[in-house]
Amino acid sequence: MFSTFVELEGDRFSKWLIDTKLYRSIQTCLQCSPFVPNSENFWALHWYKQWREQFNSLARMHLSAYLQEPNYWAAKKTIARFTNSQYSLADYFQMANAEIETILKNFNPEKCSSLKAYTIIAIPSRLKDILRQRKEADICTNWALLRKISKKQFLEALEQAGLSPILIAQYRLAWTCFKELYVQNQPGGTRALPEPERQLWEAVANLYNRERQNQLTQPTPQCTREKIEQWLTQSAIYVRAYLYPPVSSLNLVISENDATTTFDLPDPSSDSLIAEMIAQEDAQNLQNQQFQIQAVLLKALQNMDVITQEILQLYYQQGLTQPQIIQRLQMSQSTVSRRLMKARESMLAALIQWSQDTLNISVTSNLVNNMSSALEEWLKVKYGEAI
């Protein structure tokens, strides 16, 4: 389990490959530690701790092997959901494998004791984010992309490209000046933003040269408009490379001196015992999360003032319209509308905070919209039960 990798053939599962180096590592650990629990979760957390504290490459490879099956299942679910996508099962599987580092960085064993359970939840979300980002990167011009990218993503793209901290600071300041001056007032939306003119590059260069003494920690020479344009053009290339991360099969990440061995294990797509265990674990985690979400929303509801709770009851339980509530409570339209909006916002904020604290997932605009819709349904069901 900690030394085998999936091999696909013709976009289907073919066989498991054993990395002999990882296999020997596991056997050595078991022989040297006869009294430790022989459970997958124990060893998963053991290798995770090794990776986190020592950035151990061997530990990372063990974890990569361990997460092959949830990544395979995530790829299967994704291709079934996005039937019109240009990507194959192998593409999705490689994308999932490429996210191992992100999964390990975001995993918090104090909040979720199972790395596999966390991966099962987090990887599908990461794949959807990648698809959204790739679509955005594909249809945007360089300048629209630089307008839309977040600061966090921009800096991560530069770090991924291997730029020095000094150069990253210069690129960041140039990008900030560009965003300030390149106003989105063009017809056709941000995706069709035209090529910046010479006057804009001169204005960006002038702003950069004024701000560099205050914004940059180390002295740097003045920049010409040609240099600024070159930096931002290169930045767009780095951003696209970041949004289109290179994916290579982890089956190939094996040292030259260590051969692989074919090992006949059940096809992951079959009803294997492992697959059944994952499904049961997934169902149990989902049920626990539903209970936690219920508690979070009820607590947020109970913390509201009496008048707001009454407005919610009239709106969702009795089905009154806002004009009817206004007449019933003798309040202004703005007061009723504002209280309804604030009530929903506070409950949505509690739900988002729970998602970040418990699941360690990045909250995107699409996720917030989905949460908002789910909250609306929950309120209808919650007050409908009281009728």
Image: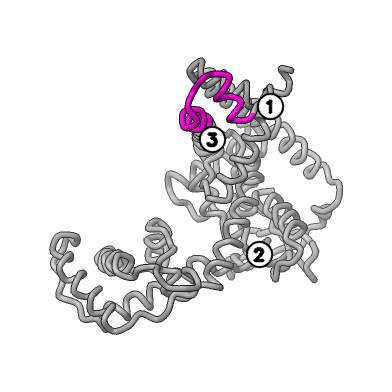
| Cα separation between marks 3 and 1 | 21 Å
Q: Secondary structure at mark 1?
A: loop
Residue at numbered disc 1: 319
Image: magenta residue range: 321-340
| Cα separation between marks 1 and 2 | 58 Å
Q: Which disc number belongs to residue 251?
A: 2
Report the coloring of the rendering. Answer: one colour
Q: Which disc number belongs to residue 348?
A: 3
Q: Quadrant of residue 194?
A: bottom left
Of labels 3 and 1, the one closer to you:
1
Residue at image point 62% right, 21% down = 313
Q: Please tell me whether residue 290 is drawn above or below residue 95 in the rendered image.
A: above
Residue at image point 15% right, 68% down = 210
For the stretch drawn in magenta, what is the main secondary structure?
Answer: helix
Decide: marks 3, 2 in contact (CB < 8 A)?
A: no
Packing grade of label 1 (10 A; few <14, some 14-19, many >=20) is: some
